[in-house]
Image (cartoon, rainbow, N blue to C red):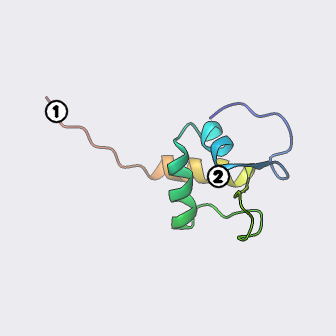
Amino acid sequence: MDDFDGDLQTTLWTTAEAAKAAGVAPGVIRVWAHRGHLRRANSPKARVPRYRAIDVVKAEKATRGKARRTYALV
């Protein structure tokens, strides 16, 4: 995750901004929202979804902590 300036409670990010901050692809942000890990901060009728920065940080932390990566021994 990047270092942030400003208030994470009130800062709103677009999907692209949230993805850049979390270090993931924009599609991952959409998946998090679809799975309920991340809620839109603006109206569902709005053309561009916006997410609260603090919610993105929490979703990133939760999903990285739950990631189950296994690697085969070679």
Callout 1 secondary element = loop
Contact between marks 2 and 1 (CB within 8 A): the answer is no
28 left or right of 2 in image: left
Q: Amino acid at mark 2?
A: Lys
- Looking at the rendered image, the quarter that the C terminus falls into is top left
Q: Residue at x 51, y 50 (%)?
A: 28
Callout 2 secondary element = helix
Residue 46: name its quadrant. bottom right
Q: Amino acid at mark 1?
A: Leu
Q: Residue at x 51, y 66 (%)?
A: 35
Q: What residue is shown with label 1?
A: 73
65 left or right of 57 in image: left
Q: What residue is shown with label 2?
A: 58
Q: Nearer the viewer, residue 43 or 5?
A: 43
Label 1 environment density (alpha carbons within 10 Å; few <14, some 14–19, many ≥20): few
- Looking at the rendered image, the quarter that the N terminus falls into is top right
Q: Nearer the viewer, residue 39 or 64?
A: 39
